Image (cartoon, rainbow, N blue to C red):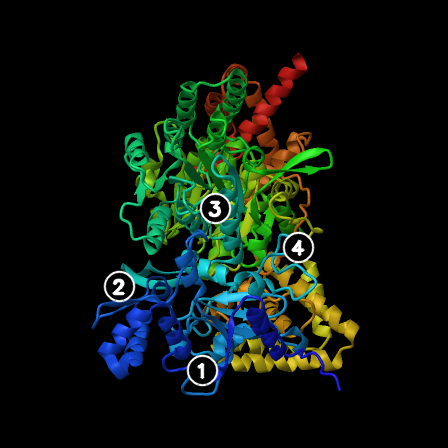
Amino acid sequence: MTKQTDTAEKGLESHIAHLLVDTNGYLLRENHAYDNVACLDSVLLFEFLEATQPKSVAKLKTYHKDLYEQKIIKRINDQIQAKGVIEVLRKGITDGFTDTKLQLFYDKPVSNYNASANSLYQANRFSVMRQVYFSPLNKKSLDLVVFINGIPIISFELKNELTKQNVEHAIKQYKTDRDPNEELFRLGRLMVNFAVDTEEVWMCTQLKKEKSYFLPFNKGYNNGAGNPPNGGIKTDYLWKEILTKSSLTDIIQNFCQLITEEKEYLDEKGKVRTRKEKKLIFPRYHQLVAVRNLLADAQEKGSGQKYLIQHSAGSGKSNSISWLAHQLVGLHDKSGQNNIFDTVIVVTDRRVLDAQIRENIKQYQQVKGVVEAITEGSKQLKQALEEGKKIIITTIQKFPHIVEDIGDLPGNNFAIIIDEAHSSLSGQMARKLNETLSKLNLDQATQAELEEDLEDILSMIEVEDAEETITGEDLIRVLVKSRKLLANASYFAFTATPKNKTLELFGVPFQDGDKTKFRAFHLYSMKQAIEEGFILDVLQNYTTYQSYYALLKKIEDDPEYDKLKAQKKLKHYVESHEHAIKKKAILIIEHFMENVIRKKRMGGFAKAMLVTSSRANAVKYKKAFDDYLLKINSPFLSVVAFSGEIDGQTEASLNGFSSANIPSEFEKNEYRFLLVANKYQTGFDQPLLHTMYVDKKLGGVNAVQTLSRLNRSHPLKKDTFVLDFANTAEDIEKAFKPYFESTILGEATDPNKLFDLQDALDNFQVYTKEQVFEFSEKILANVPVDQLHAMLDTSSEIFRNDLAEEQQADFRAKVKTYVRLYIFLSQILPFENPYLERLYIFLNHLQNKLGGDTPIDLAQGILDNIDMDSYRLQLEATTNIVMEQGEDLKPIPTDMRGGSSEPEIDRLSNILQTFNDRYGTQFEDADKVRQMAENIANDVAKNKELISSIQHSDDQNARITSDKVVGEELLKHITTNFDLYKLYSDNKEFKEDFSAMMFGVVKELINRGINAQK
């Protein structure tokens, strides 16, 4: 009888183990060789030591005699516990009794010509062991463990879809069944733990039970998450590419690192303290591949090359840059004799990168003074270059000097790494650039091309509300072009959102039909970062003001909704220019208080950004925000950010602290609104930013970079929200398309659909209203998670047993739609019906139990890992909780202002209605008041002084004249309508509103009269 294929996980385990042995040259070890107290395969360890270092071993045996093995094992374990396995493998150990050094692992030499180093590297014993009983306390076993010279470095839990288990179950096994207190699972003992099935690989460097943080280690498919089909097992790259001897050696020597970070926290007294935390970093797949490919290409082609690395936010660029910088320093040509680069220059705006790179280099090279940060200016830079410092870290502002100095050192080769040059460029910097370029000897064609580029840049800088922000990226492009890519320098440009011109200069050309196009050398897309859960999709809850307004109009007469004052204010929003900012400020603050703070988004810590169209508007908004926040006694404050000064006012004078302190002050809890004009729209990382209000036209890269300020992940962030006054959804979709195949347009959202869905779902009878209530109450009561599972299991049983297959599919789809729709609508509409909220919470958990083709949502954590605190917080406020792929909104065109052809009488009626709503006045004879207002408007419009002022003066002066004339005319009507005059005299805000609206109507009447005479 022929033996059948083993489709269980044992079959996958056997397949991987045999491939490692047959193809990669590993040794297959029996599991009884593992000593789970010493955490070693000691037979293999001593075999390696005796074969490679016989003299040292003989010396140790002479001194320690029979205790020789015991002493070595103890020393190895003490050192691993103190420093971690990576450093011990890299640097070996020293026996203190005899001052004898033992190497535990030999690195691969840079060249094969070094025969003795090569034979030592070949003597390393790479081995694999199946079913490893890791604990002396029980009989639990790991599916596979990889060892180097008898020291365990990687563990694996394997699952096979054919047995109805997948990578999610492997992760759950690590979280629930692998005790982090076991010696093998202590931080730094293993390099990484892999959860593997035939579709995906996930990794974790520190097991912490439910808090274990697993990251994807996948190739990506169609620029998204997952792995591509390859005609075999989709995850076989793990054992075929990553676990080869040379690849694993490279990871140990050049990538993996145990670092110590300083974390801030609040003590019981509310003081900020710092504590040190150790963290083990293992590269993600795209980081490893990008760095390796860049090094291979640079080794092949030498200096004088250019590379564009398009890695999205959330890709871990700081680590990628650190790894690349340190390895470029040691990069040899193929002979192994010569370094390709003398100096690596990192151009960055991130302060953190300086410290990170130093820390990184320190781990690999015991040479002081390798890294130099340029803080003093060009003199220090020139000196560092001449002294041959290996790594120089400098800012974008000093880049023009670098380009100049490199040209003066033709004998040296440079690698220039440019990190996300997205900070906006000032006119002063652009002029400095112009000076630098004028000193260069350029041919006429280059000079003409650069002058055109510079003219574009300077003209864009002067335009405050330009849709495209001019950034450091433009500066670098012009400078690099100016030097015709010097043969002694290679450029490595990292950016998430390259502009077209940058792609053209740094990208890889390829033919598409008869056109030459350009692509990045390596891509980790925004789509993949979102699907893998590293950043949030800011388009999920993107809505234009028109859509928002239309939704509120739609629900006006619906008894299911609470008609809040905020909606009334929104409905009657009057966009007369001078009032627009004041009114929008109130609308923004009220939206934020109602839909973000009251609903406890991000546990109540959420912050907002307002993007304004000019510096003058930013200043006006700052005043409007401060006035209104004070008026409503809000505990929250705003911060404004713009460059230079407006009417003698600066950031410092308006904020009360220096410009440099804006990021750190905005960290504080009381600062919730950041009002910006061409500042902090790029490269600004503040994970608590949750909501954005956009009052500026945005286009192209600028739109992507600006909205991406919201996408940084945070343990409390489940969603984001954008309210856009200035752009259409089509504009934004068009801007995002090149960077992420995302669509944000769906059909117009009807709130009634939510009630229809609720009704339809209830009628399936998979759950009862009582169960929904009980489930949400249990979450509030913080019951053990198994009780929640029991309730969900009851409903999922009914779903499986009582519904036909077609009904199951229908129910599943409706659950998904309900959850999405509720998330979106709850950000806009204040539901008064708590059942909708409870049902949302229940269905959001139930959907995980219904099977179907829903992708594994590992990034959000497995069902068991419910953040009870945030659920309770938000349930108590009867609001929204978790973000999923949200449903999209097509804007419903609504003319907020009513066309300009609207007769004045109707317009005045609207104005008076607005006054009634806003100020609670009930004019007894509305018609009479309207008539009077019309008469005043007509009389004011005949005033010669005002007509002349409107014709020959600016709006500001004309408005002063208008207000004076309106006051005089109103006084004439004191006997006809005393109520109106009293309100005008006593209520400042009413007077301001009435005067502004009168000015709008009168100005139109006068202009129409002037035009009619022409």
Residue 189 percent location from the top left of the image: 38, 71
Q: Which circle, 3 or 1, is nearer the viewer?
A: 3
**Amino acid at pointer 2:** Lys
Residue 925 visible in image = no
Residue type, mark 4 in image: Asp
Looking at the rendered structure, the kind of residue marked 3 is Lys
Residue 798 in percent (x, y) is at: 70, 81
Pointer 2 or 3: first along the chain: 2
Q: Earlier in the sequence, mark 3 or mark 1?
A: 1
Q: Kindly tell me whether residue 125 is visible in this rendering.
A: yes
The residue drawn where x is 52% and y is 15% is 444
State the quadrant of the C terminus: top right
User: In percent of the image, x 24 and y 77: which residue is there?
Assistant: 62
Which residue position is annotated with label 2?
269
Up-down: is 51 above or below 929?
A: below
Question: Few, some or many C-alpha atoms within 10 Å of disc 3 (few <14, some 14-19, many ≥20)?
Answer: some
